[in-house]
Image (cartoon, coloured by chain):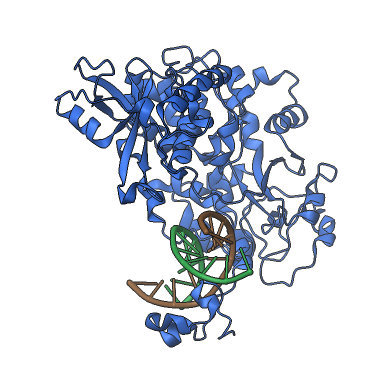
Chain colours: A blue, B brown, C green
Amino acid sequence: MHTRRLVKRSILGSRVYAPSPTGDGAPVTGVVQAVKQEGRDVSAAGARRSVYTVLMQDGSLKEFSEEEIAAGFNHTAVKGPLKSSLKSPSNGAPEGQKLEGGSLSPEVVEEQRVVDSKRVGRDPDARSVSLLEQKRKVVSSSIDVPQARRSEEEVDMDKVTAAMVLTSLSTSPLVRSPPVKVSEGLSGSWKDNGSAGPFTPSSNSSSGGYWSWSAPSDQSNPSTPSPPLSADSFKPFRVPSLGGVGPGPAGPEDPSLEEQDGSSLLFDEPIPRKRKNSMKVMFKCLWKNCGKVLSTAAGIQRHIRTIHLGRNCDSDCSDGEEDFYYTEIKLNTDSVADGLSSLSPVSPSVLSPPPPPPSPLPSLSQLPDSHRLPQSSDTKEPHGGGSTPLSRSAPSALYLIHTDHAYQATAPVSIPSSSSNSAGSASTSFTPTNSSSFSISWQSPPVTFTGNTQVSPSKSQSFGEQRSQTIAVLSSPPRATTALSRKVRSEGKKCRKVYGMENRDMWCTACRWKKACQRFTD
DNA sequence: ACTGCCGGGAG
DNA sequence: CTCCCGGCAGT
């Protein structure tokens, strides 16, 4: 199991010297594309060596053993026979693209690497190899492969990749927008100015799904101030935590995000253990007395713009104000059979969660009632009672809400105190200065974490980075869900305690498997 | 830090 | 299916 994890970045992407293919002694440089362990499992009598797939200067891919590359480092220019063609442990067509011209998408390389590491390192004879090579040509020429990256760019990949990873981490809600949006929204701006290089947003939309935990919240795209803004004013706004990345590479954020999935596949663990994503994203209008929920950001924006803001013009003239009036919600598609019904656009105003912990939930069916009262805009004064106006909103157990705008985020945060806590604690503890001004301007935002548990703003708040804090809080599911799903930690003795680690074989199987103990249940 | 155990992977 | 383990969350 370790072996799986051993093969890791480090050397990937680094430039190495390698023996010249022509054998004339001049060392050539290349960039390591992949590393694989040879003879790991079966044959090879335990000789575990690494084989590096190197992207050569001329764009071709070769494989080198560890020694060869090491020799190259020392400039001794080993003229040893290149093993690329003979050595390549081929026995299947799929890896064929490997040797062909430098146009390999990272995915291909990655995939090939995986395949390789699983395969038995067989030694084919030269003839069969050459046959295979013939075959490969056909294969590779018929595969639609994106243009190769040049090797200089490859060198920069580390930096860029790191930056992009940071970016994607810090800009959670913005991650990934539908390609269409990207091209239309950005075509004018920074896409042209400079770095169009490796990050053409074209290639594969297929790799998108893995890794993005956040929803496709494209709504900020149309509404963002758009082209004229310089990268300076643009970046800090959306990517606050992006520290010292040069103006150049940091530019093509969005277009590259698609790509980044691919590259992270290459440089990271193939696929970070993926959580099953049963969330569906909807957008909910926050306008007073309007709970309209639409499935697309564009839709909700249009709704707000036309219905509430009374504007008729197209999305072009939007100044982004709509953003303030809707929020993104994630519904748990598993458990919302009934929740969905209340969410559907048909019943726009029927959203009221079972009131927080104290009361035994009155079942969702009586919702419409409680909501009836015209939501006074008094806000923030939590009538200290069961059905405050604020309690209208989502059943927190069913779906999570998180807003897209950090500034917007402060509002919901100051709210939750209303329903479950008695006034003071939460709100005061959270918003440092002008909490009042904020909470006023947000009329009864349905965003709520009230749930059955208090939001845990108190957990470890350092106001220094309240911004990121809030984001974190917002995007994390309400405790309620986990509390429900996870059993309360049982107190009784368990096998581990009783027998101890040394007597592990005396444990019940469940305990041995780290499952819920079957022997000492309670 | 320790512990219980869920979720998920490997075989 | 069994077996195992990463990682989360409660203590």
* Side (left or right) of A30 relative to A334: left
Picture residue at 55% right of the left edge, 23% below the top:
A203
- Evaluate whether residue A269 shows in this view: no
Picture residue at 35% right of the left edge, 48% below the top:
A6
Q: Number of labelled discs?
A: 0
A135 and A72: which one is in front? A135
- Using the image, determine if residue A85 lies above or below residue A448: above
A436 and A405: which one is in front? A405
Query: The N terminus of chain A is located in which quarter?
Result: bottom left
* Side (left or right) of A137 relative to A61: right
A328 and A482: which one is in front? A482
A482 and B5: which one is in front? B5
Q: Position of residue A299 (x, y in %)?
A: 73, 31
* Side (left or right) of A382 relative to A55: right
Picture residue at 57% right of the left edge, 51% below the top:
A275
- Evaluate whether residue A404 shows in this view: yes
Q: Position of residue A214 (x, y in %)?
A: 57, 42
- Using the image, determine if residue A333 lies above or below residue A321: below
Q: Quadrant of residue A32?
A: top left
Query: The C terminus of chain A is located in which quarter?
Result: bottom right
Q: Position of residue A423 (x, y in %)?
A: 57, 62
Q: Quadrant of residue A182?
A: top right
Q: Position of residue A45 (x, y in %)?
A: 33, 50
